[in-house]
Amino acid sequence: MCQGVILPIEKKEDEGKIKGVKNGNSGPAISHLLFADDSIFFTRGDAKNLQALNEVLHTYSEGSGQRINFEKSSVFFGDHCPEHIKDRIMTCLNVRCVAIQTNYLGMPSWVGRSPTNTFNFLPDRMWKKIRGWSDRPLSRAGKEIMLKSVIQAIPLYVMSCFHLPVAICDRMRTTILNHSWGIEDGKNKLH
C-alpha cells in the first residue's frame, strides 16, 4: 500500500464513525482485514457503525467499478447477540447468510471454550496423510524427508496465526514419532 493513501474505512475510523473490535483488553481495535480477493470487516452493530460501513462499501464499489456480491457475503455474530439485533444488522447490510463456526483459509474463524477441540483437525490431517503412505516402503532417510517436508508443513500456517494448545502439539509430535520409529508387534519401538 502506498504511503499517504487513506482507505475510506480508515477515514471513517479517524472520524469515529466506525469502531473496530478489540482482541482482549489491551489489543488494538481491528476494523478490517484485506486479502487478495476477500475483505473482512469488524464493527459494532449500532446504526452509526453500520451506516458508515455501508458508505465504505459504496465508495469502494464506485471507485473500483466492482460490485459486492451480497449472495456470497456473510455476517458473523458473537455468541450472545440477540436475534432481533442480528435481523436488524442483516437487513441494514443487505446480507442474508450467517456464518456459523466456519473455516476461513483452512483455519477456524472462531475458537470456542475448548481450543483443543477446535484444533483437533491438525493431528487428524497429519495422521491421514501418513496413513496414505503406509503401502509405500520407505528407507529411513525417505521417511525423514517425507515427515519434514510434508507432515511438519501441515500445521505451519495455522501455527503462524494461533497459539496451539499443548495437547495438540503433543498429539502432532506423537504422530510423527510413531511413524518415524514405527510399531513392532503392537508396541512402540524405543526411540
Image: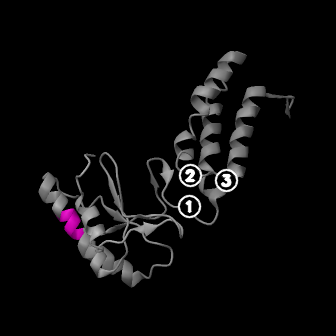
Residue 106 in view, yes or no: yes
Residue 72 forms part of the magenta stretch: no
Instruction: State the SS at label 2.
Output: loop
Q: Are marks 1 and 2 in contact (CB under 8 Å)?
A: yes
Q: Is residue 89 above or below residue 151?
A: below
Q: Are marks 3 and 1 in contact (CB under 8 Å)?
A: no
Identify the image quadrant of residue 86.
bottom left
Q: Which residue is mark 3?
A: 165
Identify the image quadrant of residue 7.
bottom left
Q: Amino acid at mark 1?
A: Val
SS majority, magenta = helix
Q: Which portion, as a residue range, is magenta?
A: 54-58
Report whether 6 appears left or right of 97: left
Disc 3 crowd rating (10 Å Cα; few below 14, some 14-19, many 20+) is: some
Q: Amino acid at mark 2?
A: Phe
Report whether 8 appears left or right of 174: left
- Residue visible at 54% across and 67% down? 24
Q: Count the labels in the image.
A: 3
In the image shown, does 127 or 115 lie closer to the viewer? 115
Q: Which quadrant: the C terminus?
A: top right
Q: Position of residue 21 (x, y in %)?
A: 43, 68
Q: Which residue is mark 2?
A: 162
Q: Position of residue 94 (x, y in %)?
A: 25, 71
Q: Which residue is mark 1?
A: 111
Task: Give how far apart the Cα atoms at labels 3 and 2 are.
Answer: 9 Å
